[in-house]
Image (cartoon, rainbow, N blue to C red):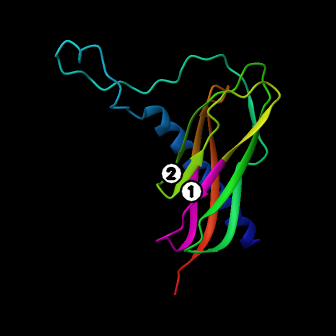
């Protein structure tokens, strides 16, 4: 019974973290975008990052969670998250970002046609980490949901 309660607590915490990441993703300010006042010599306000106005579609991931199990600190590991465009419009992966520099996603650059599948590869470098590690990858698309959170987990053993 304690195991089930602890598992439910863990799932609840992950859902809260996922929700917070989604909220902060929409609030992120992109300081590299110029504003109209910068060209006139006036000091502009940084623009809010906008999601392109693309036709909406739907995306289905085979899995949004991967557990590497126990890994040594020196072993870089990879996970592949397969997805399918289940909508009627081309799917565009606008962005893919890890929750820290040790988690690097590689996304398809070309649109995925309706009914077709592809994948996002995630590399996790545990160097300098130890113990249980949970990392999130935020995927931004032109799907109805806009963002999807992928999660990886590992127990990192320190090198001796």
Question: Within 10 Å of the Cα at label 1, are there few (<14), some (14-19), or many (20+) other Cα atoms?
Answer: some
Instruction: Residue 108: say if magenta.
Output: no
Question: Within 10 Å of the Cα at label 2, are there few (<14), some (14-19), or many (20+) other Cα atoms?
Answer: some
**Cβ atoms at labels 2 and 1 below 8 Å apart:** yes
Residue 24: x and y in percent read 46, 39
- Name above or below for residue 133 compared with residue 110: below
Q: Is residue 138 left or right of residue 56?
A: left
Q: Give the quadrant of residue 55.
A: top right
Nearer to the camera, 24 or 124: 124
SS at badge 2:
loop
- Name above or below for residue 25 compared with residue 9: above
Q: Residue furthest left?
A: 41
Residue 138: x and y in percent read 57, 42
Q: Give the quadrant of residue 112.
A: top right
Q: Which residues are magenta?
A: 121-136
Q: Residue at x 50, y 51 (%)?
A: 99
Q: Report which residue position mark 2 lands on.
A: 99
Q: Which mark is residue 67?
A: none
Q: Which image quarter is the N terminus in?
A: bottom right
The main secondary structure of the magenta stretch is strand
Instruction: Residue 123: say if magenta.
Output: yes
Nearer to the camera, 1 or 61: 61
- Name above or below for residue 109 compared with residue 5: above
Q: Is residue 94 left or right of residue 31?
A: right
Q: Report which residue position mark 1 lands on.
A: 135
Q: Residue at x 30, y 18 (%)?
A: 35
């Amino acid at each position: 019974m304690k195991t089930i309660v602890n598992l439910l607590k863990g799932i609840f915490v992950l859902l809260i973290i996922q929700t917070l990441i989604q909220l902060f993703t929409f609030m992120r300010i992109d300081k590299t975008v110029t504003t109209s006042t910068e060209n006139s010599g006036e000091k502009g306000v940084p623009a809010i990052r906008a999601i392109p106005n693309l036709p909406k579609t739907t995306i289905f991931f085979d899995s949004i969670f991967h557990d590497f199990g126990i890994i040594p600190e020196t072993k870089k590991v990879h996970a592949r998250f397969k997805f399918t465009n289940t909508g009627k419009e081309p799917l565009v992966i606008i962005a893919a970002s890890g929750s820290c520099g040790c988690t690097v996603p590689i996304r398809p650059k070309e649109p995925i046609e309706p009914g077709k599948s592809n994948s996002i590869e995630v590399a996790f470098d545990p160097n300098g980490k130890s113990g249980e590690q949970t990392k999130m990858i935020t995927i931004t698309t032109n799907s109805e949901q806009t963002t999807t959170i992928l999660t990886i987990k590992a127990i990192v053993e320190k090198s001796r």
